[in-house]
Image (tube, helix red, strand yellow):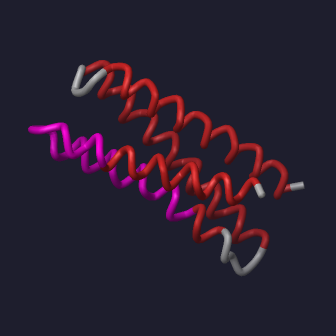
Amino acid sequence: MKENKLVDLSMDFAVDILMLCETIKGHYSSTNQLERSATSIGANIHEANYAQSKADFISKLKISLKECYESEFWLELFIKAELSDKEKLHNLLVKCGTIRRILIASINTASK
């Protein structure tokens, strides 16, 4: 059940990031990096659900976690650089944090 929630959250987060990046002009390199890391979170979670082994499952979730940390970096940078509405960016940062916490819990559970 957590994995389904995680899939849904990561998909919604990716869509929100794509929509955000469409509104930011003149920072293609940075928005591209955010898009890549944010969409990779969900892609790896989705792939983890079809893992060939427990180790493969954990590995995919760990990749998602790393991408989550990268997405948080870009969102924090966008906040500091005032590239978009601060409240919108903060809400995305909160969503990313929620996904990160669920990923950490899922990795810890799967590792036991």
In the image, residue 44 sits, relative to residue 26, either above or below, namely: below
> Where residue 22 appears, x then y in whole percent?
21, 46
Give the residues drawn in magenta, as a range: 19-44
Residue sitting at 57 percent across and 34 percent down?
97
In the image, residue 95 sits, relative to residue 12, either above or below, namely: above
> Where residue 51 appears, x then y in whole percent?
68, 75
* 69 on left or right of 60: left
> Where residue 101 appears, x then y in whole percent?
67, 38
* Magenta stretch encompasses residue 30: yes
Residue sitting at 30 percent across and 18 percent down?
80
Q: Nearer the viewer, residue 77 or 94?
A: 94
In the image, residue 37 sits, relative to residue 96, either above or below, namely: below
Give the quarter of the image for residue 47: bottom right
Q: In the displayed image of the protein, which residue is found farthest to the right? A: 112
> Where residue 78 appears, x then y in whole percent?
30, 28
Quadrant showing the N terminus: bottom right
